[in-house]
Amino acid sequence: MTLILAEMAYWQETSIRLLVGLAAVLLPAGTLVYLFLFKMMSFMQSRLGPMEAGPYGSMQLLAEVGKFLQKEDIIPRAADRLIFKLAPFVVLISTFLLVLVIPAGPDLWFIDVDTGIFLALAVSSISVIGILMAGWASASKYSLMGALRATGQLIAYELPMVLAVVGVVIQAGTLNVQNIVMAQATGEIFGWGGIGNPFIFTQFLGFAIFLIAVQAELTQPPFDMPVAESELVTGYLTEYSGLRFLMFFIGEFATAGIFSALAATLFLGGWYVPGLDPTDGLFNVIGPAVLFAKMLLVAFLIFWFRFTYPRFREDQLQKLAWKVLIPLSLVNIVATGVLKVVF
Amino acid sequence: MAAKIRIPGMIKGLGVTFKTMVRTLTKGSHTVQYPHVKEAPTARARGVIALHEENCTSCMLCARECPDWCIYIEGHKYKAPPRRPGGKPRKKNALDRFDIDYSLCMYCGICVDVCPFEALFWTPEYEYSELKISNLLHDKNQLGKWMETVPEFEDYEKGSEAKKAQVPE
């Protein structure tokens, strides 16, 4: 992308980046909602899901979006109007910023910074502010409770997530996401370079911790205490309707897609397929598709857990993060560091 | 110890959902696509209540027992000619109005049970939804039409001496 963009005017480059960015956020989100939320969840419950809109209900998403757009935009009288209106944008912004760092090919990236993964983990925490804004500005006890729970949960699970990534960073020796992919593509398993060295083999513990933390970051079941509908209506989403609710919804599933892509990049080798030269220009064409396929694989795991397990209690949830995941990821870091020095 | 028990259970749970998904994809779901495919309700399913008008004496028992007060009956008495010449004219009840409001009805079936003259019957028909709620008020003509859908009563257990109820023609 950089090769083509180099000869363009600034406004052309910016608009292309904007369009590609929009597609990179909305396409995975739509695919995840249709493929997993509509269809896989239905199959796991022995039903077919939406079947009427388009072949196999594939147009159902458009119908849903149309439905949300028609709805009245209700703002509670006691709400802090400006903050209430801003909150969904803040959540969505963190999603859009996340997509920046994920490379889709040797020359296909939005930004190539040396602290890429650090940036990704930092901007992913912006959504906490959006959620807290939504909860506080709604002037509703359910929203406030939900937002506080969400904040506590997101802060708790941010830590194991970061620490799980540290293992990968130690092994790759770089914070640059592109270089992490390259390290996996050119790596060798005990001298055998047939499939490169996807970090899922050496960092399986990190992968598992990362997946659990992502699940919690997305406030998805079994970590959906903040939106526990039986006690908090829908938590911080309670007072939202129409377009603003849709934005939260898109934010949730787009973030699911991007976190899956991030996990695929960090642990499954990103856009690389074994057997080819990673600097090959071919990857600029097939890279996005490969990354998309790997993202779907990780997302399948995330949604499989989502549809299988019942909700954790608040104390169990915090206990899991602080007493199990964080010590485990620290052990993982120590082990990775020692092995890195030894070999 | 506790962890040893919990972890296999969590994996088993993943297996259950995965197996269900594979079964749904290969052998089809437990649900049916309703407007295209219809499941046949059982013969004595409580779908809608039918009225056999000739049997009704407007005794009001059903209307009085209805927990929702969703049955509206109006009737009048008239003198019918005597059976034999020279006899007294007979008093008879005529039904002017017999409405059941299905927007209120909770399908308890008490009216069918209390009717002493076998004028009310369950039928398994269920497709009578309306766009306007007022159209759910079925008058006696509509309730009479449902009589065509009343299925025959099922046979009693072998050896039963009770007389089998008959659906009036």
Image: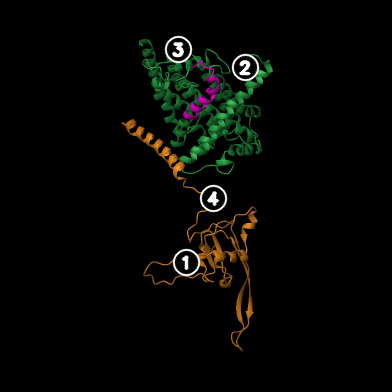
Chain colours: A green, B orange
Badge nearest the viewer, 1 or 4: 4
Question: Which residue carries the number 4 mark?
Answer: B34
Q: Which mark is residue B153?
A: 1
Report the amino acid beneath label 3. Answer: Gly
Q: CA distance from mark 2 to mark 4?
A: 52 Å
Q: Are marks 1 and 2 on the same chain?
A: no
Tell which of A281 and A160 is nearer to you: A281
Find out whether the residues at labels 2 and 4 contact each other: C-beta distance under 8 Å.
no
Under circle 4, the secondary element is loop
Image position, residue A274 (x, y; %): 45, 21
Q: CA distance from mark 1 to mark 4?
A: 27 Å
Badge nearest the viewer, 2 or 4: 2
Report the amino acid beneath label 4. Answer: Tyr
Report the amino acid beneath label 2. Answer: Ile
Q: Name which residue lies at 52% across and 60% down.
A: B124
Q: Is residue A292 above or below residue B63?
A: above
Under circle 3, the secondary element is loop
Image position, residue B74 (x, y; %): 63, 68
Judging from the image, mark 3 belongs to the subunit labelled A
Magenta region, residue range: A278-297
Badge nearest the viewer, 3 or 2: 2
Find out whether the residues at labels 3 and 4 contact each other: C-beta distance under 8 Å.
no
Label count reads 4
Q: Name which residue lies at 32% across and 31% down.
A: B4
Whichever of labels 1 and 4 marks the residue nearer the N terminus, that label is 4
Q: CA distance from mark 1 to mark 3?
A: 81 Å
Find out whether the residues at labels 3 and 2 contact each other: C-beta distance under 8 Å.
no
Judging from the image, mark 2 belongs to the subunit labelled A
Image position, residue A109 (x, y; %): 56, 18
Find out whether the residues at labels 1 and 3 contact each other: C-beta distance under 8 Å.
no
Judging from the image, mark 4 belongs to the subunit labelled B
